[in-house]
Image (cartoon, coloured by chain):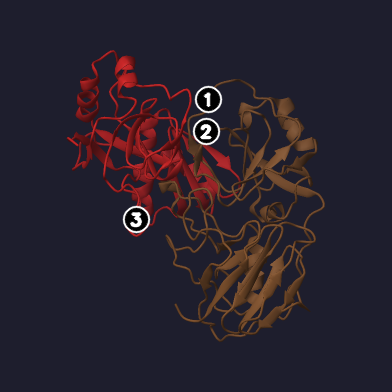
Chain colours: A brown, B red
Amino acid sequence: MTDRAFAVVRAGALTTVQDGGRPGHAHLGVPRSGALDQPAARLVNRLVGNSPDAAVLETTLDGCALRPRRPVTVAVGGAPCPVTVDGRPAPWGAAVRVPAGALLDVGAARSGVRSYLAFDGGVRVDPVLGSRSTDLLSGLGPPPLTTGAVLPLGSPSGSHARVDTAPQPAPPRELVLRVALGPRADWFTPAALHTLATRAYRVSSASNRIGLRTEGPALVRAFPGELPSEGMVLGAVQVPPDGRPVVFLADHPTTGGYPVVAVVREPDLAAAAQAVPGTPVRFVATGWR
Amino acid sequence: MRALPVGDRALLVELADGAQAQALHAELLRRRATGALRVREIVPAARTVLLDGLDDPGSVRAQLPGWEIPPLPAHAGAALEIPVRYEGPDLAEVAAHWGVAESEVARIHSAAEYRVAFCGFAPGFGYLTGLPDGRSVPRRTTPRTSVPAGSVALAGTYTGVYPRASPGGWQLIGSTDAVLWDHARVPAALLAPGVRVRFVAVER
């Protein structure tokens, strides 16, 4: 390992390495994984001159603190949060030079859930099946950060970012998820589909990288019985026996046995990654196909 | 055959039974290999095949009914052999369910030929079809909190082998030293969909 590395001083509640994920292996039972808020991960990479899919850190609610062994350029985005270098305030959403041995502290999210840290050169842990992403469901990729761990960084490409700062969407006060009904909408009563499309749900605190769980009126099945296991897509709205919709996020299982009532538009999932527990959720059935 | 839209980039193709799903899966792999079909993920399952990452799902959906899909040849080519010590903790329960002696379970299970229908649950966990008719077994009423890696197990009409230690509710009839999952290997899963398998009884 070269000296281009950082030591973890405070790992935070859940900080993982994420990139564009490992699509193409679903048939072997391998989740796609990758940053939950892909636009935020791509943006912080651009701010430090990386390729958009370079590996970044994804924090959860309370940030993390790190000490680089060499001077690095860092950008923090996604959920807005205080950023300090050796205790001095530093900008969020812009490239910051961190001297060797300085303490970079990414504070708790002021709103939203997940902040993203890009380093010039990217996090260079060993890839697994073409990706450096941590997959919490199946345990592929590097483990979540732990205090005292040291992670390697790659060499900067030498290209300069073409932007200094860039606008980022605020985390949602209300999460509006556009859905296309199906493939198993016919497993639910018409009244249940009306409920899904018209009633308010809330983000459950049981949400994680596997799924956005919701609380709200249960969706009633049109008939009992079991569905044989079938392939699942990102954004699938799966309905377990308790009737509360679960929106599948990046670490979702690749096959499953509960009916999928609808599928969320992929561009709407970045906001789902930033919705704190309790956020109102509306599913809007659209003709976006 | 019925193709259901799944969001704006995917189709779920529903077949009459598992054999037809496996035949369609093989046909889809052939078409992707020739470049006739462009799709990111082909995910077979119990009675369906998911096509995810299609540029134009509508046109694939329109073409599918016109495809000729040859049935899978039953015994073509060599089958992968997996050595099994038939001494799992649920041997007695499976024997009782089948109404045979415990020693018969190994003979019945190793006499059949299997095929990996699909994966799921964990990377490299394959659902193998091929258990003789009338030999399905229920899942355990209480799942185990940890099933050791290499456990050979039955549930419903499927056989599976746990690639790593995990919770599980399948009936454990034996164990193997075969490496089910190695992400440095291509493919990483020993039991990838379409692979034919024979289980060979070995002593400890």
For label 1, the crowd category at 10 Å Cα-Cα, with few meaning under 14, some 14 to 19 and many 20 or more, is: few
Measuring from the top left, give residue B47's x and y in whole percent. Answer: 43, 32
Q: Is residue B131 at least partly visible in the picture?
A: yes
Label 2 to label 3: alpha-carbon separation: 32 Å
Query: Which residue is nearer to you in this view: A166 or B11?
Result: A166
Amino acid beneath label 3: Thr
**Which residue position is annotated with label 1?**
A226
Query: Which residue is nearer to you in this view: A233 or B159?
Result: B159
The reply to whether dot 2 and dot 1 touch (C-beta < 8 Å) is: yes
Chain at tag 1: A
Amino acid beneath label 2: Gly
In the image, is A200 to the left or to the right of A242? right
The residue sitting at 36% across, 26% down in the picture is B157
**Which residue position is annotated with label 3?**
B34
Q: Which quarter of the rendered picture does the C terminus of chain B lie within?
A: top left
Vertical order, A83 against A264 (above or below): below
